[in-house]
Amino acid sequence: MKNNVKVQRAIANITQAELAEKIGVSRQTINAIEAGKYVPSTVLALKIAKLFEKSVNEIFELEATD
Amino acid sequence: MKTTYLFPHRFKKIGWLVFVPFAIISLLSLFIDLELDVLTVPVFCFIESGLMSGKPTYFGIIENNITNEILMIVLIISGLLVAFSREKIEDEMVEKIRLDSLVWATYFNYTLLLIAILFLYESSFFTAMSVNIASLLLFFIIRFNWMLYKTNKLSSDEE
């Protein structure tokens, strides 16, 4: 699964740590999501989308391998 | 998201402080006699097979040196605290790392046990079984903390 959390974060001008705190996870988790090493749960994806005021589909995208 | 069956984070430190010295002492006790005479006391038992005395005891009082018992109980409890206390931020990724590490440690532990069953006999096998009492916990603790460390290191290069 691909995502553009890093882009959204840049637009919103917040750090990984700030994003992490707002949605109640560790900064390492945000980092792993951005690096494509961790696929967040539906709840977490919804929280991220809500924070950036986007739909989940605008941030997360299926890949061919999924 | 709340994980069930985990201890509060503060128990992790207490666990480490007890687990490390007791792990070392327990390891030593496999090779040298650490039994303290003062710890030979009467204890209640369910079953004592009576290998030495020739007659078994059921639900009775026997004489026993409780050095081993103390070592094992403290080792297991402190190991459980280290292994299963919450991380400072126990989020869903930590849960995943925890589960993966537990699966890995279980396979690893039983692989070693299978090797021991195949190639160790008599008292050597008994020693292996003694190690096996705490080895699953130990392998899990090592694997879990190593994976956490790797994740932390990976994310230390934030802009």
Image (cartoon, coloured by chain):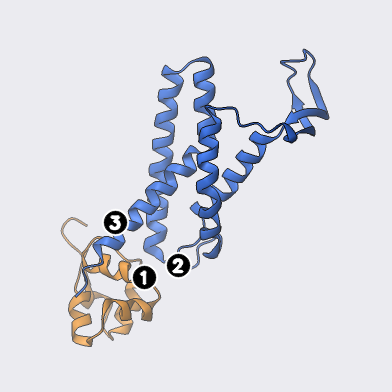
Query: Which residue is labeled 2 in the image?
Result: B88
Comparing A11 with A52, the one in front is A11
Residues under numbered marks 1 and 2 in contact, where contact means CB atoms less than 8 Å apart: yes
Residue extending furthest left?
A: A64
Looking at the picture, how far across and down is residue B48, in whole percent?
Answer: 75, 24
* Dot 2: element: loop
Is B97 on the left-hand or right-hand side of B83? left
Whether residue B127 is situated above or below residue A47 in the rendered picture: above
**Distance from Cα at disc 3 to Cα at disc 1:** 14 Å
Q: Colour of chain B?
A: blue
**Distance from Cα at disc 3 to Cα at disc 2:** 16 Å
**Circle 2 chain:** B
Whether residue B31 is situated above or below residue B101 in the rendered picture: above
Amino acid type at circle 2 is Lys
Amino acid type at circle 1 is Ser
Looking at the picture, how far across and down is residue B39, in whole percent?
Answer: 73, 35
Query: Which residue is labeled 3 in the image?
Result: B150
* Dot 1: element: loop
Q: Nearer the viewer, mark 1 or mark 2?
A: 2
**Distance from Cα at disc 1 to Cα at disc 2:** 9 Å
Query: Which residue is labeled 1 in the image?
Result: A26
Which image quarter is the C terminus of chain B in?
A: bottom left
Q: Colour of chain A?
A: orange
Looking at the picture, how far across and down is residue B145, in whole percent?
Answer: 39, 53
Give the residue displayed 53% in from the left and 54% down from the top: B17
Q: Quadrant of residue B61?
A: top right
**Circle 1 chain:** A
Give the residue displayed 80% in from the left and 15% down from the top: B55
